[in-house]
Amino acid sequence: MKEINIIDFGLMGKQISALFYLLGYEIGVYNKSKLNIYEFEKQIKLLQRKIDFSNFNAGKINIYQHIEDLKNSLTIESLNEDLNLKK
């Protein structure tokens, strides 16, 4: 299974994660605060209404408490453009 990491689970992070999940990726997610899985599921349903993913098997999502625990994979950060957040 292909792997990808997402840092920050805000609106953009949820949308990116939902897309890769539906494409069959194993997703590692790191967020400083508690994740809202309900909003992630809403993004999945929204994408499924707009795009046919029937040729793909759903992926897997792993939630990490520490950024150091993310696997050594392609990583997308979706933090706000605030340098203090990115430190």
Image: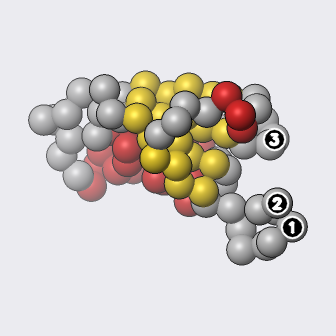
Alpha carbons under labels 1 and 3: distance apart: 16 Å
Identify the element where label 2 is drawn. loop
Read off the residue under disc 3: 33
Identify the element where label 1 is drawn. loop
Q: Residue at x 81, y 41 (%)?
A: 33
The first of marks 1 and 3 along the sequence is: 3
Read off the residue under disc 1: 84
Q: Nearer the viewer, residue 10 or 3?
A: 3
Read off the residue under disc 2: 87
Alpha carbons under labels 3 and 2: distance apart: 16 Å
Circle 1: residue type: Asn
**Way the structure is coloured:** secondary structure
17 vs 36, left or right, is left
Pick the quarter of the image with the C terminus: bottom right
Q: Position of residue 79 (x, y in %)?
A: 68, 61
Point out which mark residue 56 bears. Answer: none
22 vs 17, left or right, is left
Whether residue 35 can be seen here: no
Q: Nearer the viewer, residue 82 or 44?
A: 82
Alpha carbons under labels 1 and 2: distance apart: 6 Å
- In this rendering, the answer to whether 8 lies above or below 81 is above
Circle 3: residue type: Ser
Whether residue 65 can be seen here: yes
> Cβ–Cβ below 8 Å for labels 3 and 2?
no
> Cβ–Cβ below 8 Å for labels 1 and 2?
yes
Mark 1 closeness class: few <14, some 14–19, many ≥20 residues within 10 Å: few
Q: Nearer the viewer, residue 73 or 55?
A: 73
